[in-house]
Amino acid sequence: MEDKRAIFISITVILLLITSIIIARITLKLSKTFYLICGAAVAAIFAVAAIIAIRIHYSTRRKKLELQLDFQGRELRIEYSFLRKVAGVPTKFRLRELEEATDGFRSLIGRGGSGSVYKGILSDGTAVAVKRIDGEERGERAFKSEVAAIASVQHVNLVRLLGYCIAPAGPRFLVYDFVHNGSLDNWIFQKMRKRERERGGCLTWDMRCRVALDVAKALSYLHHDCRSCILHLDVKPENILIDENYRAMVSDFGLSKLKGREESRVVTNIRGTRGYLAPEWLLENGVSEKCDVYGYGVVLLEMIGGRRCICVLEDSKKKKKFQFFPRIVVEKLREGKLMEVVDDRLLEGGGVDERELMRMVGVALWCIQEKAKRRPSMVEVVEMLEGRRPVEEAPDTQMLVLDLLAVDEDDDDEVNGNARMERHHHRRQPRIVQLDRENPSSSTYSLAFTTLSGR
């Protein structure tokens, strides 16, 4: 803009000088005064032209240097970004970048308890999944430190955390690699897909065995092969993704909990998902890697049966009746009819290996033991699934403690305000869920609650 203005002024001055020469020639003719004016004007014209030429020369040179520096800067940024990815260092994204990548957060692909997940395309063409975290209470420094610790984790069965974004006075975002085939629940449960683009189907028995092993290896890596023991604390089918080769990748482990090697348990205010919480977590005795083992056992049984471990069979005003799938598995195992618990869709093709079924059920029953000390480590789980360790018969468990969040639903809307406050107070306390054993041969049980006193 400045160059254009300078050229315009210079041309205007030259035109004025030429005009003055013409006027002087007409009025003064060929007198000495005319020659003096003409010489001065010509000298001024040459001076202005020289200035214009010099300015254009240096302006052109400056633009070339700017383009060269800009190109070098882009190369350095690309190389720096590449090195950060190789080193596993999380990238700090700007909110505007994520808004452009996700088309203003319109492409919703999932929603969980802690936030929503959107599909996005970064400026370099990388497909990503952007998780928006609402209601995060941790400080910015703690958020960054835990993101850095998790982003350095590299494993073939873990979804890679690319970076994060902290919006000023707003939500926080985690940016993951995008996995095309969606979550495991769409591949083992029979349900209608909510979105047309949502991938799903039915995994074969061999694929389910391979997925079970992939998840076990991922959790074993988090628990035993990282510098700090990383607790996932939300192992469920929705957090297990299936890639284009139908291999499993554990996701949403970014901000779970870091546990020092010298610690046996840690206290956390993070809430897990109902149906997958270990008993010691419900009793507020702290969490450990054995909580992930419990959740993995529940997921393993759900993969075998193609159904949720806790299902509501009857919902009346007086009581609710629930079906607890692990108890059904134990009964069928004792009766020698274990094939009856397998997903019906798998039995149609006859591709279920009964020996593998026995192994997977045995591993799952060990994982869901009520006493955490009885549960195997994820290293031992991997060895049992691979056949390198024998799977002994799991000890009997009373299965008295179940996840409260799975059964403690709100009563009907006719309850008055005082009753609601009292119910809210009791909900915050741990409870023991007892199963009515009047009819032990039935797979349906009534659940009665016994409230424990506060700790």
Image (tube, grey):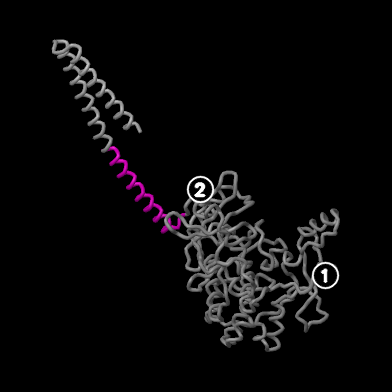
Label 1 CA crowd tier, 10 Å (few <14, some 14–19, many 20+): few
Find residue 154 and name its label.
none
Q: Main secondary structure of the magenta part?
A: helix
Element at label 2: helix
In the rendered image, residue 141, in percent from the top left (x then y), is placed at 55, 47
Residue, disc 2: 96
Residue, disc 1: 316
Element at label 1: loop
Q: Residue at x 83, y 80 (%)?
A: 438
Tell me which amino acid carries mark 1. Ser
Q: Which range of residues does the magenta coloring cover?
A: 61-89
Q: Residue at x 59, y 87 (%)?
A: 354
Left or right, 51 with respect to 451, comes to left
Tell me which amino acid carries mark 2. Arg
Q: Residue at x 52, y 55 (%)?
A: 102
In the rendered image, residue 258, in percent from the top left (x then y), is placed at 57, 58
Gap between marks 1 and 2, in whole Å? 50 Å
Residue 193 vertical position relative to residue 347 in the rendered view, above or below: above
Q: Earlier in the sequence, mark 1 or mark 2?
A: 2
